[in-house]
Amino acid sequence: MSFPSANEFHWQSLAGLASSRVYHTVAEVGGQMYMLGGCDAAGRPCATVDLYSPEGDRWISLAAMPTPRAGAAVAVLGKQILVVGGVGEDQSPVKAVEVYNTEEGRWRKRSSLREALMGVAITVKDGRALAIGGMGGDLLPRAILQQYDLRKDVWAQLPPMASPRYDANIHLLANKLYVAGGRQCKRPIKAFEVYDTETRSWTTLPTMPCKRSYCGVLWDGAGRLCLLGGLRQGGGHQSSKFTKNVNIFDTSHGAWLKSEDTLPMKTKRADFAAAFLRGRMVVAGGLGHEPSALGTVEAFHPQKKKWERLAPMSVPRCSASSLVIRDRLLVVGGVNQVPSNAHEILYVKEEEYL
């Protein structure tokens, strides 16, 4: 397999958002990007829903969500977008569950969660949504695993995890649901577990090498979990520090690679956009040891076994949402001192995106 060189990656600025937003959620349906909710410039959760149309390089306002929210969990079920939990207008978790039909352009309220939750992680298995963990109104993490059947509009409780958590990193690989890290009472945890959807049982895996939050989380095509950078938790009276370390878990061997078998990034950073693009791990923006957000970008070359600098983003920022559609990385919104309306795309092909 050939990998694109560093100078083949190009950034292009696209139409900005109508209003600056952060903590929104993005989803792809039919090769189009939907942007749901988030916080406005005043920090208020909103109900705004926008669709990006590459044909006209413009944002199209869609019907607003019935419930304003930020940081919602979103799953795509066919042509429908399921929106679960999040933070409401009163800055507390919400239990509302709603579905947007992209063909009809309409919202429907569905069966709510049993309790209000934020920081839920969600994926889809066999046409049903699996929702993992979350934080309740009492600010305590949950260990619950819930399954949602859209056709029946029913939530079912499945066996819980051993470690309660919210904001966990999850990945579905065949019939195995991996749950790595997350947070408990604002502190990152190292817990790593896997749920077998066939036997409906949990197995505890070797813990993550270090406690860290706001790291990049990627799964490669070989079934390996890659943890990039982040903010390492300080011990005792030590302060938390940005890191450029890379840790990789090989699911085929059930073990973390030794540190000498991984290569750190060039720049210490956290809260950045991360993606696999044309076989290369790419990290963009975030926060580091600079007074403001980073605009630097780098990518790992598997054959050369080194990280290489790419062209920087036009607008430095952190907390941006990102999505890969048709071998292109879209980075939208985020924060650079204040919420941003920036929208950029990273691509490899020589022709323009639009």
Image (cartoon, rainbow, N blue to C red):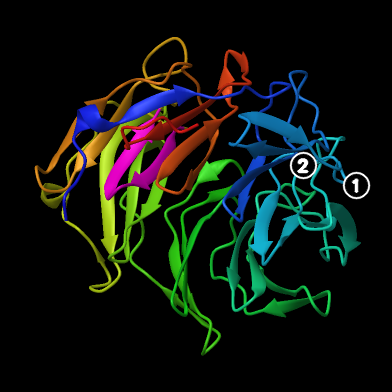
The CA span between labels 1 and 2 is 14 Å
Q: Quadrant of the N terminus?
A: bottom left
Observer able to see residue 234: no
> Residue, x 16% and y 48% (percent of image)?
302
Q: Which residue is mark 1?
A: 66
In the image, taking residue 175 as reference, residue 19 lies left or right, namely right
Could you tell me which residue is drawn at 26 percent across and 39 percent down? 245
The spot of residue 64 in percent (x, y) is 86, 41
Q: Which mark is residue 87?
A: 2
Please, what is the three-letter code of the amino acid marked with disc 1? Answer: Pro
Q: Quadrant of residue 219?
A: bottom left
Q: Position of residue 266 (x, y in %)?
A: 22, 28
Magenta stretch: includes residue 36: no
From the viewer's perspective, is residue 169 above or below residue 8? below
Q: Secondary structure at mark 1?
A: loop
Chief secondary structure of the magenta portion = strand
Residue at 67 percent across and 54 percent down: it is 74
Q: Is residue 280 magenta?
A: yes
Query: Would residue 110 appear left or right of 41 to someone viewing this image?
Result: right
Residue range (magenta):
272-284
Query: Which of disc 2 and disc 1 is earlier in sequence?
Result: 1
Residue 256 screen position, x and y as percent: 25, 60
